[in-house]
Amino acid sequence: MKKFYSEIIGTFAMVFCGCGAMTINEITNGSISHAGVAATWGLIVMTMIYAFGEISGAHFNPAVTIGFAFAKKFAWKDVPKYILAQAIGAVFAAFLLWFLFPESQFLGETTPANGFPAYKAAILEFLLTFFLMIVIINVSTGSKEIGNMAAIAVGSVILLEAMFAGPMTKASMNPIRSIAPALFTGNFQYLWLYISAPILGAITAVSSCKLTKNDNCC
C-alpha cells in the first residue's frame, strides 16, 4: 500500500502547487508570472520524484502509468489502483484550492487559448506528452523514475514544455491534472482532448522507443 499512498501524496502535491501557482497568479493579476508558473510545475514534479521515485515510481499521471504498462514495465492489474490513487490526490488538491481561493474562476483548469482550435490543442498536447514520455522511458529503470538525473530530466522537460506551450494549451500532459479542477469549475468542454491526447502521446512514445533502444525498452 505504500506505493499507492505515495502516488496520492505526490499527485496531491503536484496539483496543489502547480494549479495553486496558476490560481494565485490569476487572483493576484500575474504576480507569479508565466515563467514562475512553469518553474513551479517543473520543480514540484522534480522534488516529488526525489521523494517517491524509489517507492512508487512517481508516476503521478495516468498517461505515464498506462505508458509504462504498455511498455511491459508495469503490471496492467495495478493500473486502475494507480489511477485511483492519482485521482484521489488530484481531486483533494483541487478541492483545497477551491476552498482556499473561492474568488478564482479557473483553479488552474486546462483550456485552449482563445482562438486556438481544439484539434490543434489536441495535437500539441499529444506532442508534449510524447516528448515527456520519451524522456521518462529513457531515464527510468523498469517503472521506477529513480536517480538524480531522472528527477532533473523529467522536471526540466515539464518546465520547458510549460514555458513554451502553456499559453496555448496550459501544457497539461496529464489527464487527472485536467479533470480535477474541472470538477469544481464545471468546465468539461475540452476534457476529451486532455484525456485522449496525453494517453495517445505516451503510448506512441513507448512504441517509438524501439527505434532508438535495443534493450530495456519494451
Image (cartoon, grey):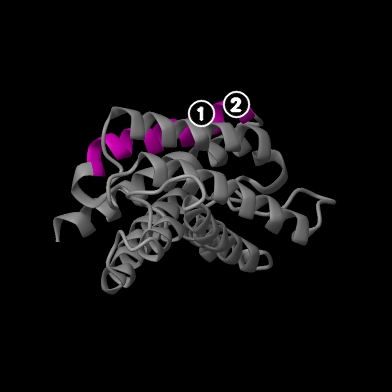
Residue at 51% over, 60% down: 175
Q: Is residue 108 visible?
A: no
Q: Is residue 83 left or right of residue 185?
A: left
Residue at 51% over, 44% down: 132
Residue that badge 2 annotates: 35
Residue 136 x, y percent position in the rendering: 41, 44
Secondary structure at badge 1 equals helix
Secondary structure at badge 2 equals helix
Residue 188 x, y percent position in the rendering: 63, 68
Part of the protein shown in magenta: 33-53
Secondary structure of the magenta portion, mostly? Answer: helix
Q: Residues within 10 Å of mark 1 (few under 14, many from 20)?
A: many
Q: Residues within 10 Å of mark 2 (few under 14, many from 20)?
A: some
Q: Is residue 190 magenta?
A: no
User: What residue type is disc 1 on?
Assistant: Ala
Please identify the quarter of the rendering in which residue 194 is found: bottom right
Residue that badge 1 annotates: 39
Please identify the quarter of the rendering in which residue 85 is found: bottom left
